[in-house]
Each structure stands twice: as structure tokens, then as C-alpha cells.
Amino acid sequence: MTTVEGIVLKERSVGEQDKFIDILTGESGVIEVSVKGAKKINGKSGSSTQLLAYSRFCIDKRGKYLYLNSAEPIHIFYGLRDSLSKISLASYFAEIMRFCIKPEAQNGDIMRLLLNSLHYLETGQRDEKLLRSVFEMRLMSEIGYMPDVVACRGCGVYEPEELFFFMESGGFYCSDCFENDTKENYMKVKLPVLSAVRHIVLADFSRLFNFRVSEETQQKLSALTETYALTHLERSFGTLDFYKSLLSC
């Protein structure tokens, strides 16, 4: 029997009483665990295996499969269910994590990123748009798609007033070095957006969420981080589409 701490990213019912849950862990990436008699479990044990629960799981391995022996909640994030936009954004975080993180992938920072994002989302201490941008770009950096935001690839200028950010390659050119005959997808942004991206990908976790941007900068930042993530993951996410539909209502 092994004990792990993790966050439930998805539940799938099996038959009338059982279910499978996908759990994000720091030690073993995303693991699939069978929960026998899940519909009969009440109280703390039941809440420990629901979507987005952060819990301590005791797991038995039988052959190739994992089975839940017991579970104890650490934090359930009940506050996310007070708002449709909050639970929808949290569901997007969970879906993108399930897609990105493979079994046996060891990265405690990724679980910390999700936990911190859910905490700030639940408490409302950070704007949802900013949280989504931080989550998307930092996750891309943690899984190997960190953009090259140090300097212009042409002349090396560090703080251009305007720049062109390239989605596939993750670098940028200042307006003097940019050649508009490129076939690569790019976005024209100003220095405050670049500064925000630099903070997201380079800051220590203790300072990651400790910054603010103007509404104009946030609009461009949201478009950039979303496009960058979807470009490199090469797919769309239904939970993101639903979340964005809520914002347009």
C-alpha cells in the first residue's frame, strides 16, 4: 500500500456503484485509481474523491491497476462551487492538466501551480483573467515550452516599446527587426505585456501571483497566453470554450 497526496482531476462512473478518478500527484504525475463502492461512500471519505478535492489517498496496487483503500480530505475547495465561472475555470485547469501531465512525471511545482491557482480562484484574491494567464504560461514553461523572452532575436534589445511575439518559436522581435513576410503566427504587443510574461515564466513560486496589470494589458496578455498554450498543445478544450461562453453572456 502506498500513500500519496493529490488533486482529483476527473471522475468517471463505472456501473452502478464504482468509479475511476484521475489524480494529479507530485511524485507520479497523473494516476488512475479505481474507487469501489463510490456511490455508497459518505462523509469525509466521499468528499475526498470528488472533482478538485485535494486529499491524502491510500492506494493498493494489484497487477497493473490501482485501487483506493481509503482517503482523507486536505482541502475540498467548496468555495469554487459558489460561482459558475469559478468552477468552470477550475475545470479547465483540471482538463489541461490531465492532457499535459503523463504518468510517472515527477514535478511538485506543477501540483503547486494548480493548488495555488485554485486557492486564489476560490478566495477571489486574484482576478480570474490574470489567474488564467499565469496558469497557462507557467504550465507551458514547466512542461518544456518556456518562451524565449530575454531579448529581441534580431538586435538583442531588452525593452522594446512594441514587439512581435511568435507563437510557435516562443521568441520575439522588436518593430525594427520584424519582417512581416513571416509565415509563423505572431501577435503584436507592447512592453507591459512582455514584462508580465517575463514575470510569469521566471519568477519564483513565492512571487508568481504577486503582480498586477492594467485592463488593456490584461486583454492582450489573455489572448497571448491562451494562443500560446493552444498552439503548443495542438488542441482545443471544451471546458475553456464553455468558460469563455459565460464571459460573453
Image (spheres, helix red, strand yellow):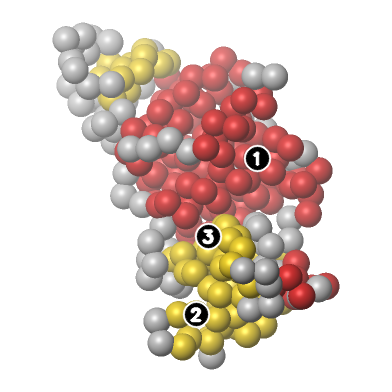
Query: Dividing the image into 4 quarters, which one contains the C terminus?
Result: top right
Q: Secondary structure at mark 1?
A: helix
- The CA span between labels 1 and 3 is 19 Å
From what the image shows, is residue 195 above or below residue 70?
above
Residue depicted at 28% across the width and 10% down the height: 175
The quadrant holding residue 197 is top left
Q: Secondary structure at mark 3?
A: helix
Whether residues under marks 3 and 2 lie with C-beta atoms below 8 angstroms apart, the answer is no
Amino acid type of the residue tagged 2 in the rendering: Leu
Q: Is residue 132 visible?
A: yes
From what the image shows, is residue 3 above or below residue 212?
below
Please provide percent x and percent y for residue 126: 68, 37
Amino acid type of the residue tagged 1 in the rendering: Ser
Q: Nearer the viewer, residue 178 or 161?
A: 178
Question: Depth-wise, is mark 3 or mark 2 nearer the camera?
Answer: 2
Q: Nearer the viewer, residue 81 or 220?
A: 81
- The CA span between labels 1 and 2 is 28 Å
Q: Is residue 157 visible?
A: no
Please provide percent x and percent y for residue 129: 60, 30
Residue depicted at 40% across the width and 52% down the height: 100
The quadrant holding residue 87 is top right
Question: Depth-wise, is mark 1 or mark 2 nearer the camera?
Answer: 2
Residue under pointer 1: 88
Give the mark nearest the N terminus, 1 or 2.
2
Whether residues under marks 1 and 2 lie with C-beta atoms below 8 angstroms apart, the answer is no
Which disc, if any, is residue 66? 2
Residue under pointer 3: 111
Query: Dividing the image into 4 quarters, which one contains the N terminus?
Result: bottom right
Please provide percent x and percent y for residue 225: 44, 31
